[in-house]
Image (cartoon, helix red, strand yellow):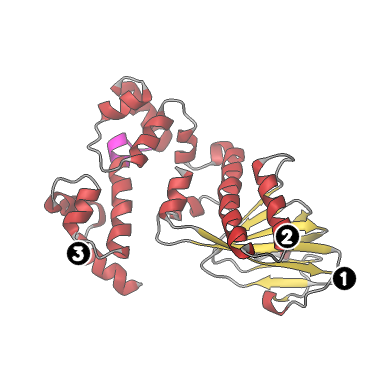
Amino acid sequence: MLTDLLGRSRARGAAFTHTTVQGDWGVEFSAGPRVSLHAIVTGGAYLWADDPARALRVTAGDVVLVRESTRHHMAHAPGAACIPFHEVPRAASGDTVFFCGAYDFEGDLIRPLLDALPTTVRLRPAPGSTLCGTMDLLGREMLREEPGRQALLDRLLDVALIQLLREHLTAAGPDAPAWFRALACPHVGPALRALHADPARSWTVADLAAEAHLSRATFARRFTALLGVGPLTYLTDWRMALARERLRDSDDRLAAVARSLGYGSEFAFAAAFKRHHGAAPGRWRAAARAAA
């Protein structure tokens, strides 16, 4: 489901630089509609958003993910004077080497995942872990000048995002989003994956219970306990999230959107959408595009 969310949000990463600094230095990264990634190759630094007193100490091997719309800084010391990243002079050698990347997302399907993250996520990949291997390869490729380098870096950054989020959410335990914890359940997890794989299917509680190898009552009780809503309410919420994406990002007719989400007619879909959003889908689409 993590891959599903990232794929439907068309998450794309781009590695854009490696930087070598020495002495007293400070870098400011402007806020924007991206999620930023910083990986320390050698040396160390301090990273903070609003308050230098809460700066994170990051050293070689650390990876930091910073949520979108967050201006942040990296420097040799907390609160050091910082200049915009694009103005930082590049040194041939120095005490600290780090590389940076950024991710763009489309639509709002990714919103629940991003909202579940703290402003900064710091991880130190375990030696031999898949994330450690990916970051090592990213660091090496960043220093190479060979054909296809940028395309390879961008793909590796996509892989790193999935691995980083997976490690962070696993470590979060009970603080992880409900859907991530539900995926780990040996019964609810298979049903949840089946629902996401085919949201247009005319699912019943009995169908989902069969995926979970539980009775309907037991499955419904466990599903609701983990996710806070019943199975069919969850299905409707997910369909409506997909509907918003289709209405905003495509010119598909309402009948086509309805069919893709498992509704028998345009009218059934329109009624469900209006109940959920308080506006007819056509009017919602017009308002969403005007706002954009």
Placement of the C terminus among the 4 image quadrants? bottom left
The furthest residue to the bottom: 87
Residue 48: horizontal and vertical position, in percent? 69, 63
Q: Residue at x 16, y 55 (%)?
A: 255
Which region is colored magenta?
228-234
Q: Which residue is mark 2?
A: 55
- Circle 2: residue type: Ala
Cβ–Cβ below 8 Å for labels 3 and 1? no
Using a 10 Å C-alpha cutoff, classify the residue at mark 3 as few (fewer than 14 neighbours), some (14 to 19) or many (20 or more): few
Q: Are marks 3 and 2 in contact (CB under 8 Å)?
A: no
Mark 3 to mark 2 CA distance (whole Å): 47 Å
Disc 1: which residue: 23
Q: Position of residue 164 (x, y in %)?
A: 61, 48
State whether residue 232 appears in this view.
Answer: yes
Return the disc, 2 or 1, that comes first in the chain's sequence: 1
Q: Residues within 10 Å of mark 2 (few under 14, many from 20)?
A: some
Q: Which residue is mark 3?
A: 282
Q: Secondary structure at mark 1?
A: loop
State which mark lies toward you, 2 or 1.
1
